[in-house]
Image: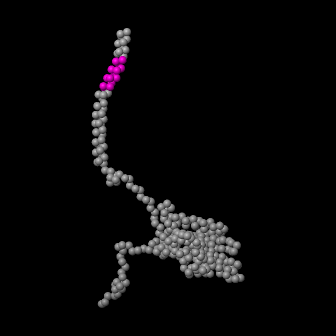
Amino acid sequence: MQRAAQRDDRAQRGPRATRLSRALVCAAAVPAVLITAACSSDSGDAPGKAGASAKPSAGGGSGQPSAKPSPTVQASAFRKLPEPCKVLPEKTLGDLVPEADTDGKKGSSDDTANRASCSWTSLDNNGVKGSQFRWLNVSLLRFDSDTSRGSGNDQAHAYYTRQVQDAKAASGAKNTKTEALGGTGDEATAVHYDLKKKEGAFKQQTVVARVENVVITLDYNGAGLAGDKTPDADGLTADAKKAAKEAVTAVASANGRSADGSSPSASPSKGTSKSPSPKGSASSAAPKKG
């Protein structure tokens, strides 16, 4: 009984003693851990701080990432269109549409700076001998450069290509021929074909030309009506080509550019030797006296 009580007492004291010793051990270990942690923190911070102060920051110390440059696109060369009914000289109109009012019929557009057109109709009535019909139309379309759509030149080239394809695929066209033209803006194509209508046999000429960011589409057709002879297709084509060149020149001139419309008027560069004045030329050309 007494032993049992002693065992119970030891059993009760045993766990308490064990817990007490563990608590003392832990209490003794805590300061060491804290000291160790503090030492570790100090020793770790010092190199980091020294390294941070010694390491130069990017961008002159601003720490801000550099802004991305805004996308740019080449500015459009031509800022406006000429008066559409004035793109062709009166002499040319007299040759192509001799019986037409030279003032022409201006197309309706609420944006004449970017889109314009003019047409002329000529009917040379010879009574019982028939009539000669001519129709001429000039359309102008200008493209502005835009960061989302690209440069005006690229947009104009894409439209030029579509216009040529549309002319070649005209409904009812027969004997279609296509010809690339030189000396007419930056690129030009002539498309000519025969077109049969109830009024007669028509000879159609379409010239599409691009000069920088402007596309010119010139349509010219002719027919002999009421028994008159069909006009010569080669003659109509030659007239259409000439008119297209003049339209290109008109676009360039309206924007203060060179006559051919392919480049701006060249100004003398710095350092270029000046031409001698007329006075100097005359004196240098004069023979020396005896």
Measured as percent of width and height from the top left, residue 113 is found at 52, 71
Span shown in magenta = 12-25
Residue situated in front as seen by the camera: 173 or 18: 18
Type of secondary structure dominating the magenta stretch:
helix
Does the magenta-highlighted stretch encompass residue 22? yes
Specify whether residue 46 is in view.
yes
Specify whether residue 188 is in view.
no
Measured as percent of width and height from the top left, residue 210 is found at 52, 69
Is 109 drawn above or below residue 28 in the view shown? Answer: below
Q: Which residue is located at x 36 percent, y 16 percent?
A: 11
Does the magenta-highlighted stretch encompass residue 59? no
Q: Which residue is located at x 59 percent, y 71 percent?
A: 206
Q: In which quarter of the image is the N terminus?
A: top left
Q: Which residue is located at x 56 percent, y 81 percent?
A: 91
Residue situated in front as seen by the camera: 91 or 84: 84
Measured as percent of width and height from the top left, residue 230 is found at 66, 77
Is 112 drawn above or below residue 278 in the view shown? Answer: above
Is 148 drawn above or below residue 224 in the view shown? Answer: above
Q: Which residue is located at x 58 percent, y 80 percent?
A: 102
The residue lying furthest to the bottom in this view is: 290
Residue situated in front as seen by the camera: 79 or 158: 79
Measured as percent of width and height from the top left, residue 96 is found at 59, 78
